[in-house]
Each structure stands twice: as structure tokens, then as C-alpha cells.
Amino acid sequence: MLVLWCPDWPAVAATAAAGAALTRPAAVFLANRVVACTAVARSRGVRRGMRRREAESRCPELAVFGVDDGRDARLFENVARAVEELVVGLEVVRPGLIAVPVAGAAGYFGGEHPLAEKLVDQVAAIAGVECQIGVAEGLFGATVAARQGEFVPAGETAEFLAPLPITELDQPDVERKELVDLLTRLGLRTLGAFAALSERDVMSRFALDGVLAHRLARGLSERPPLRRTPPADLTLTETFDPVLERVDVAAFLAKNLGARFHASLAARGLACTRLGIYATTEDGEQLGRVWRCAEPLTPQGVADRVRWQFEGWLRGDRRLSSGVARLRLEPEETVEGKSLQLGLWHGGNRSEDDELTTERAARAFVRVQGLLGPEGVVTPLLDGGRDPAGRVRLIPWGDPREPVSPPDATWPGRLPAPSPATVLEQPVPVQVVDEQGVPVGITSRKQLTAPPCRLSVAGGPPRTVLDWAGPWPVAASRRAAAPQQARLQLLLAATGRDDADEAVLVLCSGTETPVWTVEGIYD
């Protein structure tokens, strides 16, 4: 396998898109941390993972950019086209990394080194960027070789990888930071030390993720030989009328296409590891690109690669003369569905060292989405608002978890922290009375008519109110007929010896005939 790597591609692409000089130090930030920086920035002391304030203090002239996968993919299309003019069968692993089967191309150009020289010159001349090339067995070995500019002879990949640090396993497209940290704490600081362990011991301690990483450390392929030629009916073809001419429309449609494509494979117990994206324009022009993935593609992974590819086709330097009329998604390579059947905990048992792995849980959620649709798995997000129930937004798994309300909004009348641990979907009607048994209400000034003394549910036995806080007026509606409303926090006495005191959030509506409901329960 030959791998062509463009160093620091996110930072290089951001600089090129902004029209800035490549000699200026630049860095790409996510959550105020450096995720990529140019060689010039590194020479000034900027490093990956560094906070923005520290990076700018070390390099005051640093150009700051945000993460933009579409921008990276759009500009990398020029590199892919340059490589495609010399060799066939290229596969885009991610923006910045291309894999090519080396045997045929090397034989045509007279060897691996002449081929590499031609590719470097071709990319520099057409795309105007620098690249490095490495050759080794397997995608992982070839990627590491590309970063070091090495050509590893056949059968010597394991020896090449052995002295390298264990941190090489933490690739950008497959996060293994937790695994690498654990291996380091166990004293396994090189790939060779990890490869020396038996596969049985690795399986019993690190489960499937550890076995895959162990295979890579031994210089083997990313997956065992479970590949099969996919049936023809798994290809997904979509015709567009009107034609696609905008990336935002393509991104919207890609989400549905990704879910359908993944569901059709999952129904047969398969998962895609090489995705072919082929398009036909309104003028009949044929386009195509193959994306290779280190792990089986999820619905979101399919949608991302379709969106990235359309960024290159519709916004690249060589833009299409007409819109895309037909799109075909083809699983170029599949693996057994068990590649996705992973447990939530290492080895199935949770212990002090076997904590919940976020990546495994995410894959399980995506698997459920493939069966139930994008809305089948949602996560809550606490956003702005005054109503406890209204502050919680349910977001489909994989969608951006971004608050809608401005972060500096004051929200007069909002309850103070902490929020109720449980917010009832249907508020429970209750009665609140004072010491004389008279129902408690609120005045026009939103003050209590008397301190609350007892609370009862649906005429049941009353519970003593030990303490209370509030009231917090609810913002008046624009409708003139809206009743006066206020919220209170009540601490209720325990009902039995084994029970504990309970804090609840209640709402009082109306002044003449008050109506009380329980909206939430505190832990």
C-alpha cells in the first residue's frame, strides 16, 4: 500500500481558503484547543492540544481558524485529481490522506521510488501543496511510513513499527486516546512491547478495540480477512429533479441517504469499509471517488463523506458545468456485521478499570439509529428558557449539540440552580393549604396569601411542608386572559420510617381559585 500524506492539511487548507501566505503561522482550533497547525507555527512553539491563549502568547502573529470539514474536503479534491492523473484505484481515507495499491502503478513507472517522485511533483505542480509518501503493508503501516517518508520492504512492517511510540495508535480518524493512555500506564510504551503480548491476553483485557490495535501494532491489516464482494442490489441510486447544484441541499439529502444505505447493509448483517460515491451530471459527465475507512461506516460517516465529496465537486477549483442529476452509493468492500456488534463495557463487566467507553456507546447508538431512523436515538440538551420542561431540547444523535438561546440571556423569572432532577411530562394536580386548611393562592403582586403548610395529591393523605422557597413569578403571556402564575420549591416530610424528605417544584396558577401542580422532583 502506498499512502500520500499532506502534512497539517486542515491548517494548510484553512490558510489557502483565506488567501493567506503559507509562510504565515496558522492553526485550526476546536473548543479553544489546537487540532492542527502549520510547520511555521510549530517552529514558534505551537503544539496540538494547546489552549488558544497559550498558543497566541507563544506566537502573537498566529492566524486562527475554526474546524471546517467541508473546506478541507473541497480543497483536497484538487490533490485527489492530481494523483488520479497518474494512478488508478486511489482511495481517499480522509482529507489529507490518500491510499493507492502500489503494485501495478510501481511496475508501470519502474519502481516505488520513481512513482513517489512523480506523485510528489504532480501534486506540487497541480495542487500547489507539499506531500510525503510512504509504502508498507497495510493502511496503518503505510500511514506511519508516510509521516516518516519511509519505504518499508515486504514482510518487514512489524520490525519497522516495533520501536515507534504507542501514541502512533491514536490516529485522527480513529480516536484511541483512552486505550493509549491505559497502555502507557501499564508500561507498554512502544508498539513492539504491545505486539509482544498474546492475542488471547489482549482480548481478555482490552476487548475488541484492543485486539484491532494489537493487529496494527503487529503490522497486520486493519481487519481480519472477512471481506466479501457485496451483492449488486446493495447499491443505492438516487435521481434528483431538479438537479443538485448547492452543497447545503446535498448535505441535507446525504443524511437520509446515509441512513438508508446503512440500513440496507445492516439488514444483511454487513457493514461498509470502502464506499464508492459516483455521480452523473445533467450534461452526462461521470464522476467517482472511493473513500476508505479504518472502521465500518456509520450512517453519519456515510453522510459526512457524501457531503465532503459534494464540497469538492460543487465548490472546488474545477467546478461542474452542470448540476448532479444522479448519485450512486456503492459498497466497494464490506465486512461481517459483527464488526459493529460491540458491548458498552470492556469484556462485558464494569469494574474500576473498565469504565464506560464513549466511543463504543456512540457506535451502539448509531446502530440503533440505523434500525429506527435518525430520530430513534436522542440526547437531552439544557438550553435557555424559564420553564423547566421547555429548557430541555431532545437532539437526534449525531446532530450538533448547539444551544439556540444566546449564552448571555438573563431570562427573568428563571428558577435558580439546581434544576429538578426529574421533570414530569404530565404535571400532577395537588392541593396546597395553610395551617387552617385554607387553600393557598397568589395575589396580583404574585405573593403567597399564606405560608404553605400541607400538600396532598388527589385527595390523598397530606404531607407536611417542612420548608419552602419562592415564589418565582412566571413571565406574563401576551394574551390578556393569561392567569397569574408562580413557582415554589417545597420540602415535604417523609411519609415513613424508611423514606426520606422530598423536595418538589410546584406551580400555582390563578388568583381567585388557585390550581396547584407538581412539575418536577429534586434528588
Image (cartoon, rainbow, N blue to C red):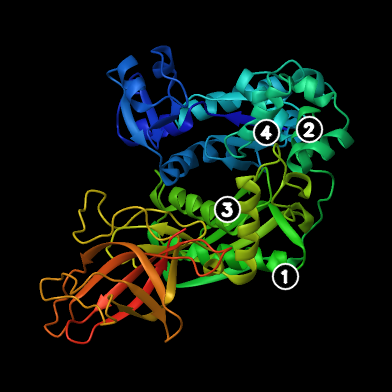
As drawn, the label of residue 373 is none
Count of number-bearing discs: 4
Q: Is residue 276 left or right of residue 477?
A: right
Cα separation, mark 3 vs mark 1, equals: 21 Å
Give the amino acid type for the residue marked by disc 2 in the picture. His
- Between 227 and 16, the one lying in front of the other is 227
What's the mark number on residue 214? 2
Residue extending furthest toward the front: 436
Q: Which residue is mark 1?
A: 233
Mark 3 and mark 1 in contact? Answer it, CB < 8 Å. Answer: no
* Image quadrant assignment for residue 163: top right
Element marked by disc 3: helix
CA gap, disc 3 and disc 4: 22 Å
Is 490 located above or below residue 79 in the figure?
Answer: below
- Amino acid type indicated by mark 1: Asp
Q: What's the distance in space between the residues labelled 1 and 4, CA to CA?
A: 38 Å
Q: Tell me the kind of residue under disc 3.
A: Gly
